[in-house]
Image (cartoon, grey):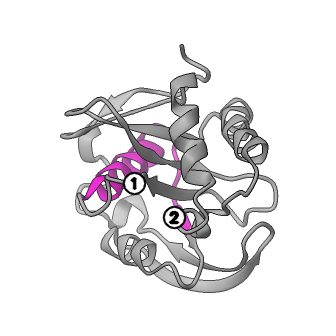
Amino acid sequence: MALTNAPRFETQRLILRGPEMADSEPLIAFLMDDVRSEGFGGYTKRDDAWRWYALNIGHWHIHGYGYLSIEDKETGKPAGICGIWNPEGWPEPEIGWVVFEGFEGKGIAFEAALAVRQWAYTELGFTTLTSNIVPDNARSIALAERLGATFERAYENVQMGLDHLYRHPAPAELDDGGMGAYA
């Protein structure tokens, strides 16, 4: 059952779609894993993690964008989330990603982030995007840099404390003009 007006699109290995009720348990499990979700905020109480899940649904209704669920085509299982995030207090819209346990190291976050960035540039009309990454999250920093993002500045994030803002290339700076899968 669709909970948002989110689009559905596919990459070579993934389906990106709006959140569904069946996505709540894998996301809550991720959010409550204090080691895995440290760079994403993390929660110690299940009801707080559930509220974050509901917050993402509300974010879609307020902004017209948010986190998409990543579904692995081969298994049909939820593999993570990736989308555009801009809650109150954020410096500007960002591309964010999370890959669930068992799906790391397969290029899923890279594939999903490329597709989300292309969607943001071609369908939503964004001309710039960032990724906000806690300083010790080496894997997310490496992914942002692989996507062509460069460190712009450190700032105090209202939720995370010290954060690093990475700027993604503008559509005109990309080899395909940001068209990617939509060309």
Residue 77 position in % (x across, y down):
34, 34
* Placement of 120 over or under 104, stated as above or below: above
Closest to the observer, 71 or 62: 71
> Is residue 127 shown in magenta?
yes
Name the residue rendered at 37%, 77% in the picture. 142
Residue 8 position in % (x across, y down):
40, 26
Q: Which residue is mark 1?
A: 101
Q: Is residue 21 left or right of residue 42?
A: left
* Image quadrant in which the N terminus is located: top right
* Placement of 164 over or under 121, stated as above or below: below
Please report contact status of discs 2 and 1: CB closer than 8 Å, yes or no. Answer: yes
Q: Earlier in the sequence, mark 2 or mark 1?
A: 2
Tag of residue 36: 2
Q: Which residues are magenta?
A: 107-131
Q: Amino acid at mark 2?
A: Arg
Is disc 2 surrounded by few (<14), some (14 to 19) or many (20+) residues within 10 Å?
some
